[in-house]
């Protein structure tokens, strides 16, 4: 039990990392809404609602997969330095790095 090391988990994900994914999904939803409006003038408006529902339901798993894999790729795990304390990294409040105690 004494050999258990403490690890530091840091998420380095920023909004810029997922910004493109959000834009692509918004474009997909906008195109599906445009298709729904085009089908709304047809004799059966149920097709318009089915089109929007189908596009949203089919695109959400891909969006979720993209978000989760991006998040997992931005998680850093590193062992803590024995006797070290956590100190904020300048310029980024959300991240902390271990400080090695000086031996002087």
Image: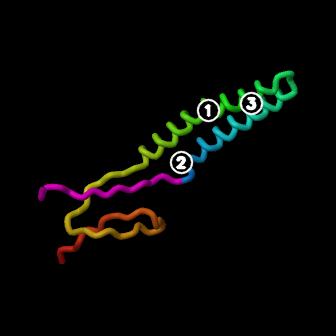
Q: Note whether 28 is above or below 18 in the view shown.
A: above
Between 90 and 67, the one nearer to me in the picture: 67
**Residue 66 in the image, given as x and y percentages of width and height:** 52, 38
Return the residue at label 1. 57
Residue at image position (68%, 35%) is 28
| Foreground tag (2 vs 3) | 3
Residue at image position (31%, 58%) is 8
Residue range highlighted in magenta: 1-14
Label of residue 49 in the image: 3
Find the distance from the CA under tag 2 to the CA under tag 3.
Answer: 32 Å
| Foreground tag (2 vs 1) | 1
Is the Cβ of the residue at disc 3 closer than 8 Å to that at disc 1? no
Q: Quarter of the image for the N terminus: give it.
A: bottom left
Q: Quarter of the image for the C terminus: give it.
A: bottom left
Return the residue at label 2. 17
- Crowding around mark 2 (Cα neighbors within 10 Å: few <14, some 14 to 19, many 20+) is some
Find the distance from the CA under tag 3 to the CA under tag 1.
Answer: 12 Å
**Residue 46 in the image, given as x and y percentages of width and height:** 77, 26
**Residue 76 in the image, given as x and y percentages of width and height:** 36, 51
- Mark found first going from the N terminus, 3 or 1: 3
**Residue 35 in the image, given as x and y percentages of width and height:** 78, 29
Q: Is residue 8 left or right of residue 20?
A: left
- Crowding around mark 1 (Cα neighbors within 10 Å: few <14, some 14 to 19, many 20+) is few
Q: Quadrant of residue 24?
A: top right
Q: Quadrant of residue 2?
A: bottom left
Is the Cβ of the residue at disc 2 closer than 8 Å to that at disc 1? no
Between 52 and 8, the one nearer to me in the picture: 52
Q: Is residue 69 left or right of residue 22?
A: left
Q: Residue furthest top?
A: 43
Q: Secondary structure at mark 2?
A: helix
Q: Secondary structure at mark 1?
A: helix
- Mark found first going from the N terminus, 2 or 1: 2
């Amino acid at each position: 039990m004494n050999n258990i090391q403490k690890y530091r988990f840091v998420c380095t994900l920023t909004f810029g990392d997922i910004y493109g994914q959000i834009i692509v999904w918004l474009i997909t939803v906008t195109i599906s809404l445009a298709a729904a409006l085009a089908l709304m003038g047809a004799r059966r408006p149920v097709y318009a609602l089915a089109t929007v529902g189908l596009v949203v339901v089919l695109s959400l798993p891909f969006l979720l997969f993209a978000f989760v894999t991006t998040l997992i790729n931005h998680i850093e795990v590193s062992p803590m330095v024995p006797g070290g304390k956590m100190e904020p990294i300048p310029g980024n409040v959300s991240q902390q790095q271990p400080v090695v105690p000086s031996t002087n």
